[in-house]
Image (cartoon, rainbow, N blue to C red):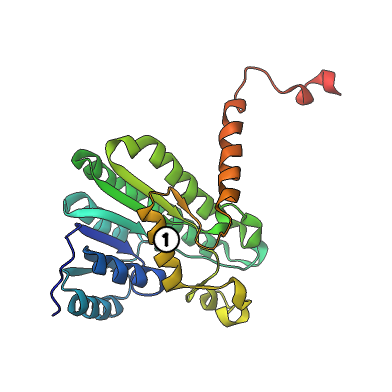
Amino acid sequence: MTSNTTSHLGTALITGASSGIGAVYADRLARRGYDLILVARDRARLAELANRLSTATGRTIEVLDADLADAAGRARVEAKLREDASITLLVNNAGLGTHTKLLESDVDQMSRMIELNVTALTRLTYAVMPGFVARGRGAVINISSIVAIAPEILNGVYGGTKAFVTAFSQSLHHELASQGVRVQAVLPGATATDFWSKGGLPVEHLPKEIVMSAEAMVDAALVGFDRGELVTIPPLQDESAWQRLEDARQALAPQLGGSSPATRYTAAAH
């Protein structure tokens, strides 16, 4: 086992950790000095990743096999988040997605997507936040998607779930930043993972110029985390474009309430 000279940063719990983006986060965070709790359904793959990373980094790595779309599986992870005071970082990475059009998609599968992308992420965050606030320290990284702000690109339910993740992250930051809690929403574009093949469109069929490797995406996201960003969009070259959109949203906010309808909606306007 390689000795680890990196300072200990607590424990990071990562969902969807057995492959793709989650597995890269596991590697990078272990090398930064985090112990890990790896969560996914496939215990064998988790154990293999844990053994490899433990040998490479000397960190303590625990595996927790659970289906987060199932209430019983979620409850086990929620209990871990509530009870383990060593946890300083939650990476909500587990999720389902599809590029299939709404009316070509199975509604039960769409419901399962909501259960995982929205309900599980919300419940795990609720489980960990009281401890973070009590200790005045902690961070949550929520993996959203560019479809949160461009929902027309892919399936509408998927886009809706990711819009929730981004809005939830922004609200958490507003409520809890002053209490020592960090929140980051990461909005990847097309990333080279099995997301695409599971939906019937292998990533090799996408234009190469729009596809980022999982390693490059996570490394960029962690730079954004180090910069203290609330929203990180790894493929966005013009940072000011996002800032202009956010400034416009903030400027609109004070105009969204009123005791009477806008004049265009009154009888006099017709």
Q: Residues within 10 Å of mark 1 (few under 14, many from 20)?
A: many
Tell me what residue is drawn at x 34 percent, y 51 percent.
Answer: 140
Total marks placed: 1
Q: Relative to residue 166, is residue 43 drawn left or right? A: left
Q: Position of residue 62 (x, y in %)?
A: 19, 68
Q: Which residue position is annotated with label 1?
A: 221
Please report the residue visible at 31 percent of the width from the left and 63 percent of the height from the top: 14
Task: Kindly identify the residue that appears in the image at 61 percent across and 74 percent down.
Answer: 209
Q: Secondary structure at mark 1?
A: helix
- Residue 183: where, in percent of width, then height? 37, 47
Q: Is residue 120 visible?
A: no
Identified by mark 1, the residue type is Ala
Which image quarter holds the N terminus?
bottom left
Residue that protrudes farthest toward the right in the picture: 270
Can see residue 191? yes
- x and y, in percent, of residue 139 in the image: 30, 50
The image quadrant where one finds the C terminus is: top right
Image quarter of residue 105: bottom right
Q: Is residue 193 left or right of 133 when viewed as pictured?
A: right
Asked if 160 appears above or below 35 in the picture, the reply is above
Q: Kindly indicate the quadrant of the structure image that contains residue 84.
A: bottom left
Q: Quadrant of residue 158?
A: bottom right
Q: Is residue 8 above or below residue 256?
A: below
User: Which sits in the foreground, 92 or 220?
Assistant: 220
74 to the left or right of 203? left
Residue depicted at x 34% and y 67%: 25
Q: Nearer the viewer, residue 225 or 129?
A: 225
